[in-house]
Image (cartoon, grey):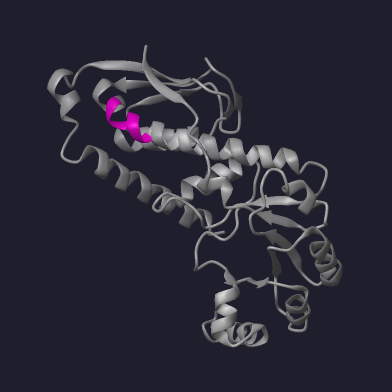
Amino acid sequence: MISETQFNKEIDLIITNAIREDVGDGDHSSLACIPESITGKAKLLVKDEGILAGVEFAKRVFNYVDPNMKVEVLLKDGSRVKYGDIAFYVSGSSQSILKAERLVLNAMQRMSAIATKTNHFVTLLEGTGTKILDTRKTTPGIRALEKWAVKIGGGENHRFALYDMVMLKDNHIDFAGGITKAIEKTKQYLSNQNLDLKIIVEARNLNEIKEILQTPGVYRILIDNFNYEDTREAVKLIGDSCLTESSGGINEETVRNYAECGVDYISSGALTHSVYNLDLSLKAV
């Protein structure tokens, strides 16, 4: 994953762009009927069940919109919530609260859905030692939020983007002329560019795993679309040579079985691309 500094820059960009998109030259609904001097208070009301995520992001949004707004947090990120819970109160300029409302809700609803789904996978993997990973199958423009939500739900982050880790998948290997050539070219490239990046290589069958193991310097082998028997054999072949990761259509019904094959990680795009928003509302009090 990227550094904390870069991650915070991504969050700042998301907030800046989202407010630009939503507010434009002004929230004319509020400007038209609410005097600038009026202050108010609102509560973040939970109308669903799951894992709460996005509270810290909401605080950053409110501060960006109006540093004078105050947030009283009752439930932190990662809390298990139910219908009727109140996550926080926000008070200050009524215009400012309304200006921030939609971004806060949109982000928290999606982040909470992702955290809830991730936490379910984490629960399914309890006792196996296998960790669940996200992927780059995220909503364009808000990847940082979605990966943040995965962490809140108890999962682990895969690479953030194309620039913070090398991942040689089937097309890279085919275009490069084979696994060995792809790995060797990559190692030479990283050396020439003075880049310290980990290398993950995808294997489509057991023979490819054997070939990968002949070339040192691979951080993790991606065991892609293997059945259970071949996954167990792959883990046995790899041993302590490098880390292992299973991927490829793994769902809630199969994730435990793959974990019991002995892999270190399981990656699932479903954590971020197949969720339904948690129902949250911001209500004046």
Residue 81 in the image, given as x and y percentages of width and height? 59, 23
- Residue at image location 70% in from the left, 42% down from the top: 122
Verify whether residue 95 appears in magenta: no
Q: Is residue 20 left or right of residue 243?
A: left
Magenta segment's dominant SS is: helix
Left or right side of 10 for 250: right
Above or below — where is 25 with respect to 207? above
Whether residue 108 is situated above or below residue 179 in the rendered picture: above
> In the rendered view, does 266 fall on the left or right side of 7?
right
Residue lying farthest to the left in this orientation: 32
Does residue 100 belong to the magenta stretch?
Answer: yes
Compared to residue 190, the image places residue 271 above or below, namely above
Where is residue 243 shown, x and y percent of the image? 75, 65
* Of residues 161 and 174, the one drawn nearer to the viewer in this rendering: 174
Q: Quadrant of the N terminus?
A: bottom right
Instruction: Work out whether residue 204 can be spotted.
Output: yes
Total labels drawn: 0
Q: Residue 92: x and y, percent?
A: 31, 21
Of residues 226 and 237, the one nearer the viewer is: 226
Give me the residue at 77% from left, 46% from top. 256
Dividing the picture into quadrants, the one containing residue 252 is top right
Q: Residue furthest top?
A: 285
- Magenta range: 98-103
Which residue is found at the position 17% from the left and 25% from the top?
29
* Residue 196 visible (yes or no): no
Residue 105 percent coordinates (x, y): 40, 31
At x 71%, y 44%, the residue is 253
**Where does the C terminus fall, quadrant-wise?**
top left
